[in-house]
Amino acid sequence: MDMKKKRFFPFNVEQTVNILSEFGPLIAMFVTNAIYSESDPTLRHGTIAIISTTILAIIVMKLVLKRFPIFPLIASGVTIAFGTLALVTDNPTWVIIKVTIFNALFAAFLLFGLWTKRNFFKYAFEKTFYYTEKGWNQFTLSFAMFFLLTAVANEYVRLTFNGTEMYNVFGQQMSGINIWVFFKIAIVLPVTGVYAWVMTRLMQKHRLPPAAE
């Protein structure tokens, strides 16, 4: 069996690696910040954790998938760049800003592709999924809107909770950046999963048999 197609319900290996490469470093940052919160007001340990685990995730991608998936690789590279900026400036908020900028630019990238009749999602996934032209356009537009909404939500959390300031959440003291990590893991991750699942079901009416491609 092709390793990339092996199932880890409900995801195959490639999807599992991509999800872990996105949220694994966030979990590492959350745990590290919780451990060093009192002795590390600028949260440098957590920033180092997200950078190092992101680099580790890139290595795992290559070892498991035998290649670098383009979108996770770009996202990981941006995470490392903004994490480094956070270390240089002693301001962990750059890690949060990265998500706003990346999601907004990615949405703009998808919309630009639709406007210029170059559907980038189709080019990236047409060997995996088989949809009509109308289906690809609807799929891409819906995800562009989703990325814009997540960018706005991310910025709202950033502006509401200062990165290094402490807040009382459910009776626990949490830094602003750990609230953001919690938001990403407890809200963004499941919402993204449900949204992707709903979209794949809605896209069935636009599905083509592989032989039609």
Image: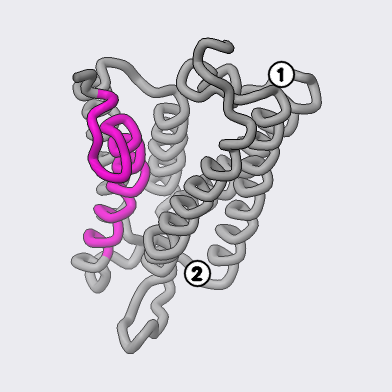
What residue do we see at 32% from left, 40% from top?
Answer: 11
What residue do we see at 41% from left, 31% from top?
Answer: 72
Pointer 2: what residue?
162
Please state if 44 lies on the left or on the right of 158 as rendered: left
Q: Is residue 79 visible?
A: yes
Query: Which element type, helix, strand or loop, lies under badge 2?
Result: loop
**Magenta stretch: helix, strand or loop mostly:** helix
Work out whether residue 49 or residue 141 is closer to the camera in this orientation and state it: 141
Q: Residues within 10 Å of mark 2 (few under 14, many from 20)?
A: some
Q: Which label belongs to residue 118?
A: 1
Image depth: mark 2 or mark 1 in front: 1
What residue do we see at 23% from left, 61% from top?
Answer: 31
What residue do we see at 55% from left, 22% from top?
Answer: 130
Work out whether residue 33 or residue 104 is closer to the camera in this orientation and state it: 104
Q: Is residue 51 visible?
A: no
Classify the position of the C terminus by image quarter. Answer: top right
